Every structure is written in structure tokens, then in C-alpha cells.
Image (cartoon, rainbow, N blue to C red):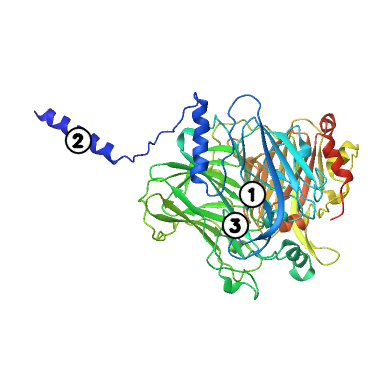
Amino acid sequence: MYSLKILALVFILIGSFLLLLPNESLSSPFSLSDPSSYTNFLEKRYSEHHEFYEYHEFHDSNEYHEKSYNIKITKEPYAPDGFKRDIYLVNGQFPGPLIECNKGDVLVINVENCLNEDTTIHSHGIFQRDSPWYDGVPGQTQGGIPSNETFTYKFKVDQSGTYWYHSHSRAQYIEGLLGPLIVHDPQDPYLHEYDEEIIVILQDWYHTDSKTLLATFLTPESEGNEPDPDNGLINGKNSYNCSWAPNGSKCDSDAPLANFKLVYGKRYRFRIINTSAFATFIFSIDDHPLDVIEVEGMMTKRHTVHRLPINIAQRYSVIVKADKPKKKYWMRSEMESACFAAPATNLNPLIKAIVEYEGCDNKDPSSTAWSDDVENCVDLNVTDLKPYKPQNVPKVDRKIEITINFKPDENNVTMGYINNSTYKIDIKNPTLYKVYDDVKTFDTDQNAFILEKDCEVIDIILKNEDGGEHPFHLHGHVFWLLGIGVNGTTLDYDKLNTKDPIQRDVTTVPAKGWAVLRFVADNPGVWGFHCHIEWHVQSGLVAQFVELPDKIKKLNPPEDWKALKSKIKEY
Ligand code: C2O
């Protein structure tokens, strides 16, 4: 009798628990053994939960596939935050359309340059193994695509994760010439742990064109203080207080915020990309913890945070569960204006978007921000992040010290220096063409490091003498991040993490701090290494690795790439 009662109670409990479950199934809606369900799965994710990314046909095969995109670049009036100005558009859109493929695909990007200046497209984070001529860097890997001409980038993608593409010419990307680039991996270890994907592009935004800003920045009067942004955007949207706009501007204070719709019970992979010129952000969604699973293409063990610092060009994937009361919540992207050299005026550093559960009422969010403290102007603590799979970090063969600082040049203009040399772009004769012309030594102002030995293990010891933080990016590679130190810490080689460091392609070197980056020189090409603050690219905080020149020469560059060189004009 007694045991029957217990049994009945158990049944009632199980029954009511089942009733409490949301209607949506929590399990992944496809199996890897059925490729067609995989295709549908992705289609659903993008078509239902993307405001502006169109779904493109998804290939899924272990065979080699070509995935082609045509992108047309124009400059037109556009008002992302209600303030109208001329910006760069890709296929009439800002941010540019999603480019996506599967790991193992060959990506083909046909670029039509409808500007009256040259341009380039750099696929940020893509290794370009055996295709170094498609890395998209003027002065280093190619001549610009001339005005009114087309050029095709075509490369094999043997990696997966969250990337982006952007112009590497002048400061074009900070005026809109960018978009997300996602590489799917059918073997992604987290594939069954989320139901849908959402791309979130964070960026700072200027209301003045970059040419004007640059001209002011590169004068003695600026004293090296970078131009502060006017606003920030999430997926190309925000509103702006037009009373701050100069008289006569075309400005509407009611521009809409980005709106992300979630379905209760589903799990989302947010792919977060910071495409800024200058600003680092702290990203969060009220009441919703973020489980970090990917850093710049490298999968990590799950690590839960509430507020995620993300510097320029960095990317994170986080899994978010939509399991909170059906309401609207704020997504916050807090611009760390405390890291700016000159205090910003007329800037609202808190950029917001709305996260809305389907079927909730129409009231504005009333949610409050997470109160966790995070340290300003540094990365998410890397010692908290662990690679998904254990790795063998090879021993170092060669240490390269790179000291960075800023000081006035002979015209009293503050410039950025790499080992006391400020980079001068050689627009007429990019490095990769020089390598094919058998040039073996490079001018000092090229900041070129030559790596001759195949598979040599390189440590970059980055020392920052400047009072600002710098997000450094290495092309053609990911590096193991062996350690980062803030001001006042000394680098002790024995204490570096050679056991389980994460790999990434952008790291912050803190103000007056240091960082140690390890990579294997096994990818023939010319690879840029630079601070991703666009103002600092323009003031010379740029280096390049000429990696395995003998092997580069054995690769056969395409004719249209060679032809670009003869079309180079001065800036
Ligand atoms: Cu986002 Cu030199 O690159």
C-alpha cells in the first residue's frame, strides 16, 4: 500500500515535469548520419533568426566543393544609426552579406570594385595555405583592385569557426567595408549542444569620413590621440542623439536597435565579432549567462561568463540558453571608453540591442545589467580558457622580440614604432611580388622578419612601452598565447603556460605590458603582424613575416594576381 502510494507520487511528479517542458524539443533536430537534415538545420537557423543575412545554399559533402559569392562594392549615403553619411556598402548592404562555407570547401569571392579608388578584401583569420596571394593586404600581398575592375579570391578553407572579411586598404573597413565569414564544421564538438546560430557584429562608428579623421590624427597637434568614435553599432544598428550632430546634418534620432528573437527552450550559439576601428567592448545579455566555446576558430572547454570583454578583430562563440521568463532583455555592448587616450564627448558608450522571446508582450526591456566586475582594457582572462582538445605545444626554436612604442617623427607627428621603426607601406611593390623577384633583403621601414627554416617554432615576445593597450593580429596563423602580463609584471619564461594555452589570432597586449605568442613557421607566405586599431595601422604599428621564401617561390601564383602589380597607382 505504502509503496503503491510512492509509485503514484512518482508518476504524478514525472507527469507534471513533462508538462512543464517547453513545446520545442531540446534535442538537436538532425543527425550527422543524415546529411539532408544537416542542410535543413542550417537553413532554418539562418532564415528564421536572421534579420538581414540571407541563407545561401549550404554544401555538405566530404568532397571538395566550391562556394562562390559575388560582391559588389559601392559608396553610398547610408544612416545605420540615423545619421546619414557616405559609407561603403557590400551588395548594397551594411554590414556586408554573410559569407559562409563548410570546412574543406573552396571559397570563391568575386569582387567588383565600383568605387573610384582601389580596394582589397582580406579574409581575417583564414590561413591561406598555398594561396598567400589571396590574403588581401596592399603593400604586402597584392596590388589593390583598381577602380571599376574585378578580382577573384579563391582559396581552400581547411579550418572552421567565426571569421570576418574586411578591406585592408586605407581605413575603408571602418566605414563599412566588412562582413561576417563563417566556416561550418560538421564535426564541431558542440554541434549537438545548440539549436540555432546568431551572428552579432559589434563595432564603433564615426560620423566623419576616415580621410578627414586621418588627416587630423596625423598632425603634431593630435599628439597621437586617436579620434574618438561618435557611436557604436550592433549588427549595423543603433540610435543616436541628433542634438549632438553638427548643424545641417541629416539625422533621425529614432533609428531602430537590432532585435534578436529567441524561442523559449532553444539554445543559441551567438558568434560575436568586434569589427571596430578603435574600441574594445564588454558584451553581455541581461540575466543570460554566456558559455564560451570558441575563440577565433579554436574550440574551448565551456567557460561561463556574464560579461565578455572583446577587443578589435577578436571573435567568440558563446552558447546561450533561452530559458528565462518570456520577456524582452537588453543586449549590451559597453564601449570601454576608459581606454581612449582622449576622453570622449557626445558619446553614449552603452550600445544596446533587444533580445526578445517569441510570444512575449511588447513592453520595452526592464532588465538590469550583470553586476560582475571585469578589469578594464584587457582581454578575457586567458587562463580561464582551455582548448577543447589537449595539445602538444612544441618547444621554441627562435625568439623574436618586438617592442612597440609611440613617439614624434621628424615632422613632430606621433607615429607607432616596431623595434624603433615605423612601417611605411610600399604600395608600388608589395612584399610578395618582391619575393618572386628574388629580393632577399627588405628596407628597414618594411619591418620584415624573415623566417627561413621550415617548421621553426617562433616565439614573438611582444613588449608594449606605450600607455595604451593594443590588439595585435597575426595573419596566416593562430598562435598559442603563452602568457600576458599587465603593467608592473615581469616576463618569466619558466612561468609561461606551455601546457594548455589557447590559440587565437588576435591578442591584447596591455598598456605597458607584454605578451608571448608561439607559432610554427609552416605556412609559406607574407603575413602581416599589426595592431588592429585602424589608426595605428595608419601610423605605422605594422610588421610582416616573410615566411619560407623558398617554398613561396615553388607555389605558382595566378596570372590575374601578377597583373594587379602593373596596375598599381599611388594612393
Ligand atoms: Cu583584420 Cu590585417 O587584419
Residue under numbered circle 1:
96
Q: Amino acid under label 2?
A: Ile
Quarter of the figure that contains the C terminus: bottom right
Look at 74% across and 39% down and name the residue there.
153
Q: Earlier in the sequence, mark 2 or mark 1?
A: 2
Q: Secondary structure at mark 3?
A: loop
In the image, the residue with mark 3 has its CB under 8 Å from the nearest atom of ligand 1:
no
Q: Nearer the viewer, residue 233 or 305?
A: 233
Q: Secondary structure at mark 1?
A: loop
Q: Secondary structure at mark 2?
A: helix
Work out which residue is located at the far left of the displayed protein and give it: 1
In the picture, measured across the screen, residue 378 lies left or right of residue 558, that is left
Q: Nearer the viewer, mark 3 or mark 2?
A: 2
Residue under numbered circle 2:
12
Q: Earlier in the sequence, mark 3 or mark 2?
A: 2
Q: Would residue 103 be visible to someone looking at this image?
A: yes
Report, in whole angstroms, how far the alpha carbon at label 2 lies from the one at label 1: 53 Å
How crowded pointer 1 is (Cα within 10 Å; few <14, some 14-19, many 20+) is rated as: many
Q: Earlier in the sequence, mark 3 or mark 1?
A: 1
Q: Nearer the viewer, residue 336 or 73?
A: 73
Report, in whole angstroms, how far the alpha carbon at label 3 lies from the one at label 2: 53 Å
**Residue 256: x %, y % from top left:** 52, 60
Q: Are marks 3 and 2 in contact (CB under 8 Å)?
A: no
**Residue 155: x %, y % from top left:** 72, 34
Report, in whole angstroms, how far the alpha carbon at label 3 lies from the one at label 1: 28 Å
Q: Nearer the viewer, mark 3 or mark 1?
A: 1
How crowded pointer 3 is (Cα within 10 Å; few <14, some 14-19, many 20+) is rated as: many
Residue under numbered circle 3:
377
Q: Would residue 189 be visible to someone looking at this image?
A: no
